[in-house]
Image: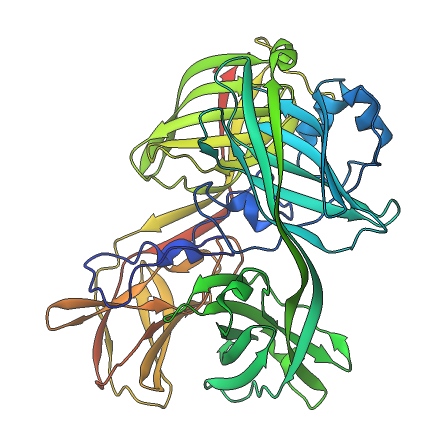
């Protein structure tokens, strides 16, 4: 399966026999769509607009209660560093005196939300807001939902985030959407719903990581029912595969349960990125966490279930009727039609259009349906200044959108030399067609080594709790891993369920597939495809302002 972002939403039903890979399950290996390489982004920014993900909202820097009439003064007067740390283009626009002053407030049950400024151009719409409460603002306030609707009542997909400023004891945040008015102006309504406050909670669990079997714990508090944990050794690391059942289904939206490992009383740092939120076989909230083996061993290692507890909620709506105007941003907008082919080892795309606004550069590319761009890092070279960026979801499966923040001081005109750059090549291969014979399948772990595309791949397989587990790994780091396996039985394909969560470029090519209700002692294993990775491979394509 493909390597993916850390949250999941849609998965195929388990009882269906498929004659093709479990593409929905493959979300755990699709590369992250990030606006800047190497940055730490909230999962919400990797999400497709139509996928409503279970995620914790990040909180951001604040505004004071009274703003001057000019949004420019407001932008300079308050600390936007945290809220705009990965949106330098918005900060750049504010510093240039761009942005539409809104200055509207709604107060419900003593909590005031104020929309201060709108940044509206041909690439996106961003609304900046603050949140404060009478008698002191709690440090953990979250809106469970925030949405924008156009004049016809149609919902406009977007995302929001907040940050707590301990000095002013208020929040500031943003709502961002790729939607932008078709014309110069538009009437919309922003609605923020169900304000909640939370606190951190924990529960001691007697987890024994040395026992590589399913371990069950009854939690029975704050809406959480049962926790199950299954440890998997992965070389020098261990994967803790968890599933949480809920007594209150709404608690799944905000508890974000995870395992905390403590050694000598200090919280142990995880050994790599995990993944949370994929629905289990019966709707459980699942998690994948990686730790160094040494951190889990010894009598000083203790374990807790960490989660978020709801303290209070206001089930009401903060609604704002807004009139958006993007005329101010037009002076810095350049649209450039292109027809630039980009060749890949297996396929090609065509860069068709570049839209430059005061906040962002967007490039639209066309290609064959559902084509995966075989690179992980993307950048624009703007007259010698490198702008990191990434791919963003597009409703059209034959299109890909690349977005790059435009930082302060960088100007783009029709004469500015611009090049598109990509790095870290990841290729998909389907030439490994020989079946892998698994024999003497039982509870004892068995191993064998086979060649996959010229690479030596070690397979480890065994049965436990009526399930067959098959792990693949390779000592060569240029081998990116097996995507997903299947077993042929009576002429049908039994699709392996991915246990591990891998990310392209994470240096881990170990993968485990699970086959429930396996009763045999032999199996003919097949793979759908595998990956190879070349971190130093670069591609550079001149766009305009220079000789191609």
**Which one is in front, 413 or 436?**
413
Which residue is at a point 47% across and 40% down the rendered structure image?
49
Q: Is residue 414 above or below residue 526?
A: above
**Rendered location of residue 511, percent (x, y):** 42, 67
Between 474 and 239, which is closer to the camera in this rendering?
239
Is residue 58 depicted above or below 251 in this figure?
A: above
Residue shown at 56% from the left, 15% from the top: 185
In the rendered image, the vertical position of residue 71 relative to residue 500, given as above or below: above
Model colouring? rainbow
Q: Which residue lies most toward the right here? A: 167
Quadrant assignment, res 97: top right
If the image is split into quadrants, where does the N terminus sit? Answer: bottom left
Tell which of 395 and 191 is nearer to you: 191
The spot of residue 451 in percent (x, y) is: 31, 66
Horizontal relation, residue 41 to residue 211: left or right? right
State left or right for residue 420 relative to residue 104.
Answer: left
Task: Specify whether residue 270 is in view.
Answer: yes
Q: Furthest residue to the left?
A: 491
Whether residue 330 sits left or right of residue 449 in the image: it is right
Q: Residue furthest front?
A: 109
The residue at the point 86 percent across, 29 percent down is: 77
């Amino acid at each position: 399966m493909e390597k993916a972002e850390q949250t999941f939403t849609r998965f195929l039903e388990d009882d269906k026999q498929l004659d093709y890979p479990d593409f929905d399950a493959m979300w755990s290996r699709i590369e992250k769509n990030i606006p800047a390489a190497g940055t730490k982004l909230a999962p919400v920014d990797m999400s497709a607009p139509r996928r409503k993900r279970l995620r914790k909202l990040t909180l951001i820097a604040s505004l004071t209660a009274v703003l001057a009439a000019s949004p420019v003064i407001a932008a300079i007067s308050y600390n936007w560093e945290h809220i705009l740390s990965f949106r330098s283009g918005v900060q750049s626009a504010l510093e240039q005196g761009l942005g539409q002053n809104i200055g509207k407030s709604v107060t419900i049950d003593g909590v005031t939300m104020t929309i201060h400024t709108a940044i509206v151009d041909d690439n996106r719409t961003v609304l900046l807001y603050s949140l404060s409460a009478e008698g002191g603002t709690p440090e953990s306030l979250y809106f469970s939902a925030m949405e924008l609707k156009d004049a016809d009542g149609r919902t406009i997909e977007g995302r929001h985030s907040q940050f707590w400023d301990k000095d002013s004891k208020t929040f500031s945040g943003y709502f961002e959407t790729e939607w932008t008015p078709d014309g110069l102006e538009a009437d919309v309504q922003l609605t923020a719903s169900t304000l909640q406050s939370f606190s951190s909670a924990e529960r001691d669990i007697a987890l024994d990581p040395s026992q590589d079997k399913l371990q069950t714990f009854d939690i029975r508090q704050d809406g959480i029912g049962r926790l199950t944990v299954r440890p998997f050794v992965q070389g020098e690391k261990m994967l803790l595969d968890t599933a949480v059942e809920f007594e209150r289904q709404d608690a799944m939206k905000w508890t974000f349960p995870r395992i905390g490992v403590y050694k000598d009383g200090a919280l142990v740092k995880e050994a790599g990125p995990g993944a949370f939120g994929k629905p289990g076989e019966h709707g459980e909230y699942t998690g994948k966490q990686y730790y160094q083996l040494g951190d889990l061993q010894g009598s000083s290692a203790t374990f807790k279930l960490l989660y978020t507890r709801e303290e209070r909620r206001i089930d009401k709506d903060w609604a704002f009727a807004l009139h958006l105007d993007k005329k101010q941003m037009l002076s810095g907008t350049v649209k450039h039609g292109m027809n630039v082919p980009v060749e890949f080892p297996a396929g090609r795309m065509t860069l068709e259009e570049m839209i430059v606004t005061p906040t962002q550069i967007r490039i639209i590319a066309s290609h064959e349906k559902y084509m995966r761009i075989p690179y992980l890092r993307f950048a624009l070279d703007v007259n010698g200044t490198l702008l990191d960026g990434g791919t963003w979801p597009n409703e059209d499966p034959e299109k890909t959108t690349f977005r790059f923040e435009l930082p302060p001081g960088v100007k783009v005109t029709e004469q500015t030399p611009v090049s598109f750059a990509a790095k870290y090549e990841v290729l998909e291969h389907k030439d490994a067609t020989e079946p892998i014979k698994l024999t003497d399948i039982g509870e004892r772990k068995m191993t064998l080594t086979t060649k996959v595309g010229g690479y030596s791949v070690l397979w480890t397989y065994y049965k436990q709790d009526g399930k067959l587990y098959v792990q693949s790994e390779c000592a060569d780091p240029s081998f990116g891993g097996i995507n997903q396996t299947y077993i042929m039985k009576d002429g049908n394909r039994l699709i392996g369920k991915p246990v591990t969560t891998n990310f392209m470029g994470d240096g881990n090519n170990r993968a485990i597939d699970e086959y429930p209700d396996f009763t045999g002692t032999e199996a003919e294993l097949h793979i759908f495809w595998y990956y190879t990775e070349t971190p130093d491979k670069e591609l550079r394509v001149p766009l305009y302002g220079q000789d191609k």
